Image (cartoon, rainbow, N blue to C red):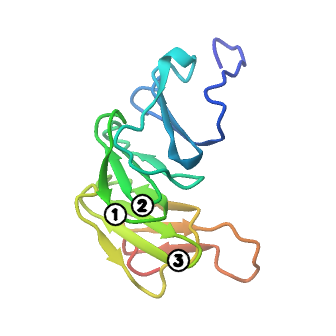
Amino acid sequence: LNNGNRTWTRWSTNDGINVLIDPKNDGVIYGNVQTGLIVKSFSNGDGVNTSFWVTDGLQETGAWDTPLVMNQENTNILYTATNAAIYKTTNGALSWRRVGNFPSVRTLELGVENPDIVYAHAFNNSSWSFYRSNNGGNTWTTINHSTIPSWGVTSLENHPSHPTWVYATRNSTFPNRDHVKWSKDSGNIW
C-alpha cells in the first residue's frame, strides 16, 4: 500500500515463507524463501535496489519452510535454522553464527517476556526433539519427556502474560488425536 495505492511489488520470484517487520523501524523487512535464503529490505520491500540477501555465515540450507524469528526488544537479533544447526545474528542479519548443533529444527520461538529464552522443536519423520536455551542460544537443554509433542510442530507460541506457558500446534487430518499441546513449565512437561 503506497499513498492509498494498492500496488504490490515483487520482492523475489521464489516461494515466500516468512515475513518479519521490524517493530522499531517498519521500513526494515525480512523475508525468507524455500530452503532458508533470507532477504532484507530497508524500504518496505519496495524495489530490488534496496533489498539484498543476508546469508553470510549460514553453512547449510534449511527445510522448505525454514523458521525465522526476531527479538522484539533488540530487533537486530534474529534466529533461523538449517538442516544441521540453529543460527543467530546480532547485527540485523549481516552475518550469522552457529549457536546450536541440532539437525532438522523446523520451529523456533522466543520468550515474549524474556527473549533470551529460545524454544526449538526438531522433527525429521522418524524422530523428534525439543530444546530450550535460557541465555540467547549460548547453552541449550535437551528436554526428554514422554509428553513432549512427538509430531512435526507447525508453530510454537509463548503466552504473553504467563512466561512459562508454551503452546505447540500441528497440521493433521487425523481425528481424535491431539493437535494442540500446552506446557506450563517452559516446555518440560506438556
Q: Secondary structure at mark 1?
A: loop
Q: Earlier in the sequence, mark 2 or mark 3?
A: 2
The quadrant where residue 101 appears: bottom left
Q: Which residue is mark 1?
A: 101
Q: Which residue is mark 2?
A: 84
Q: Is residue 104 above or below residue 36?
A: below
Residue at the far bottom in the pictured view: 146
Residue at the far front in the pictured view: 59
> In this image, 188 relative to 126: left or right?
left
Distance (Cα) linking label 1 and label 3: 20 Å
Residue appearing at x 66%, y 31% in the figure = 13
Distance (Cα) linking label 2 and label 1: 6 Å
- Assess whether mark 3 and mark 1 are in contact (beta carbons under 8 angstroms): no
Dot 1, how many residues are within 10 Å of its Cα: few (below 14), some (14-19), or many (20+)? some
In this rendering, the label closer to the viewer, 1 or 3: 1
Q: Is residue 185 above or below residue 9?
A: below
- Residue 48, given in percent of the width and then of the height, sits at 56, 18
Residue appearing at x 59%, y 62% in the figure = 154
Q: Earlier in the sequence, mark 2 or mark 1?
A: 2
Q: Which residue is mark 3?
A: 149
